[in-house]
Image (spheres, rainbow, N blue to C red):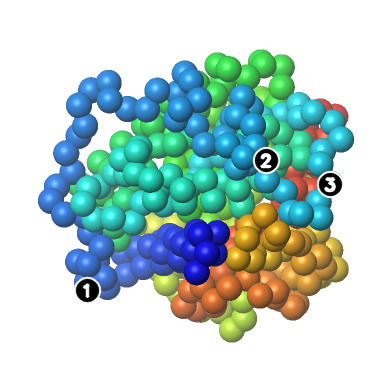
Amino acid sequence: MCARRFLFLIFFLTLLAVGGAFAIFQFGDRALTAAATPKGHFEPPPPQTGPDYAGTDNWIARPELAAPQNPSLWRPADWPPPTLPPTAHVFFIHPTTYLERDQWNAPLDDPESRDRADLFVRSQASAFNEVSDVWAPRYRQAAFGAFLLDSKDARQALDLAYGDVERAFDAFVAEIPASEPIILAGHSQGALHLSRLLKDKVAGKPVAKRIAAAYVVGWPLSLKDDVPAMGLPACRTPDEARCILSWQSFAEPANTALISNAYEKPELPGGGHRRRADLLCTNPISGTIDGAAPPAANRGSLVPSTDLGSATLAVGQVGAHCEKGFLMIDGVIPPLGSYVLPGNNYHVYDYALFWGSIRADAQRRLTAFRG
């Protein structure tokens, strides 16, 4: 097996693991939890040992990095280069890429984790490179096992990861021109951290006026209990700016019970539980909340190959509609790979299925923001 094919296989296996981690969170699968939980207890690292975001060493992508060192600059082989320089800035938080059990948080110098993170940025954050430069930090992400249980160790691991993301965001905001718009995006663990970042660093802050859109993808959000604390409303129309998008992809026959049960189970701070009826579902093709779009409207699904550089877009094949808070895909699904999760859960492909449409959506929202 050639090196490129091996790396691409690892990429999709990683996506599968990340999706599976969320799908079984709090589902009581004791055997899998025991097999994946990191050994020992969380131990806080020494002070002042976190990543330094002043330079380029701890960034996967930022404007000073040129291709091939900057994976966010990737485009499909048949996609033309941008005609104008970017005038917006994307802050992108990658999903879990550390699958080991030896510690609760990924070391920054782990080569396999770094390579997987680069591949995620290449296949997901690249959707925004038509209109924006991309800033994607490396961070001490919580290990895969931290998502399998609710414990003090797991919470501390997630807090450490979020602390890095928060500091990277502060560095990002300090570096970019104060007059230019921002897009926030993440997936899975990255979306979890982004939802917290919106509450802590955007809501009620001056920077909120600069956010053109926030793509909180692959993590459930309640319109009633989560979104109001984030400082931005949900995007309801395709030409709306300063708003939040979120979706979780399934195909029929879909079984969403695992996700729904985990979403509803935790008790809210004020008592009670989240309701399935309040799940935010944005259709990335139509750009509307609870919307529907035929396959012909999809600008393109990213179809992988053994060489990511030769991946192409399958245009007009996959449609989608929101149903009870989840994004149901239909049409002719291209050969994305065999890593569909139980219940026909396409979490692995939340970005790939709609790569071209996400690109167009970002353009529309920036136009609306400037208008």
The amino acid at mark 1 is: Ala
Query: Where residue 91 appears, x then y in whole percent?
Result: 58, 34
Q: Point out which mark residue 80 bears.
A: 3
| Secondary structure at numbered mark 3 | loop
Give the label on residue 31, or none.
Answer: 1
Q: Mark 1 or 2 closer to N-term?
A: 1
Q: Secondary structure at mark 1?
A: helix
Give the image quarter of residue 277.
bottom right
1 or 3: tag closer to the N-terminus: 1
Residue 178 vertical placement versus 198 (above, below): above
Does residue 337 appear anywhere in the picture? yes
Q: Position of residue 278 (x, y in %)?
A: 55, 58
> How many angstroms separate mark 1 from mark 3 (CA)?
48 Å
CA gap, disc 3 to disc 2?
Answer: 12 Å
Q: Residue at x 40, y 37 (%)?
A: 139
Query: Which residue is depicted at the point 50% across and 78% down?
Result: 343
Residue type marked 2: Leu
Residue 73 disc label: 2
Tell which tag, 1 or 2, sits nearer the viewer: 2
Crowd class of label 2 (few under 14; some 14 to 19; many from 20; radius 10 Å): many
From this viewpoint, is residue 201 visible? no
Q: Amino acid at mark 3?
A: Pro
Q: Earlier in the sequence, mark 3 or mark 2?
A: 2
What residue lies at 86% left-to-right and 35% top-to-bottom?
A: 83
10 Å crowding of disc 3: few (<14), some (14-19), many (20+): few
Q: Is residue 119 left or right of residue 63?
A: left
Residue 46: give x, y in percent of width and height: 20, 26
Q: Is residue 45 above or below residue 179?
A: below
Compared to residue 148, the image places residue 367 above or below, namely above
